[in-house]
Amino acid sequence: MDAGRIIVVDDYDDTRELLEMILADAGYTVVSAANGSEAVALAKAHMPDAVLMDLFMPGMDGVEATRLIKSDPELRSIPVVAYTAKPPSTDSEADLFAAVCIKPCPPATLLATVRALMPPA
């Protein structure tokens, strides 16, 4: 059963792999990106049900990538969850995200957050 498509974005391989395992075990199809630029390209290519976005990455960070996703009429309805060690620093940044999960986020909390954002089956 496919619970939905999720893009996982984090510059740390271990974090991406852990999130991929947690989400795949819960039935999600997972595509991953190592930076914001890859995330935007994958969002256009895969039209995911949600994006799990690290905020602090080299190159294009998660805030900029989320702004680009939200500025695209075809992508703007995709919920983006900030998955980060430090929450967004301003209200305008926080408003970009459907939810925020602070690392280390327990798997049950992460899955509950993602499930709440998924379209009904």
Image: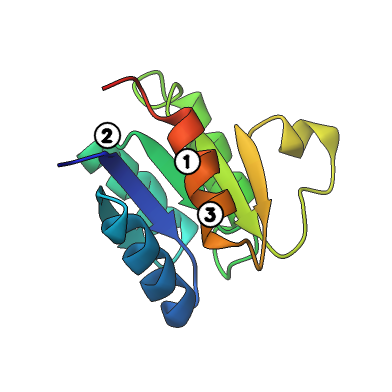
Q: Are marks 3 and 2 in contact (CB under 8 Å)?
A: no
Q: Residue at x 29, y 60 (%)?
A: 25
Can you give x and y, in whole percent of width and height, for residue 32 in the image? 33, 61
User: Measuring 46% from the left and 63% from the top, which residue is drawn there?
Assistant: 35
Tell me how far mark 3 sits from mark 2, CA to CA: 25 Å
Image depth: mark 1 or mark 2 in front: 1
**Quick one: 64 or 96, which is closer to the camera?**
96
The N terminus lies in which quarter of the figure?
top left
Mark 3 or mark 2, earlier in chain: 2
The mark lying in front, picked from 3 and 1, is 3
**Which residue: 44% across, 21% down?**
77
Q: Describe residue 89's horizontal placement relative to residue 37 as left or right.
A: right
In the picture as drawn, the residue positioned furthest to the bottom comes out as 14
Which of disc 1 and disc 3 is earlier in sequence?
3
Query: Residue at the location (56% across, 43% down)?
Result: 81
Residue 20: percent from left, percent from top: 34, 64
Mark 3 vs mark 2: give the one in front.
Answer: 3
Nearest the eye: 27 or 34: 27
Rendered image: mark on residue 108: 3
**Residue that numbered label 2 is attached to:** 47
Judge whether 50 appears above or below 24 on screen: above
Which residue lies under the disc numbered 1? 114
Alpha-carbon distance for marks 3 and 1?
A: 10 Å
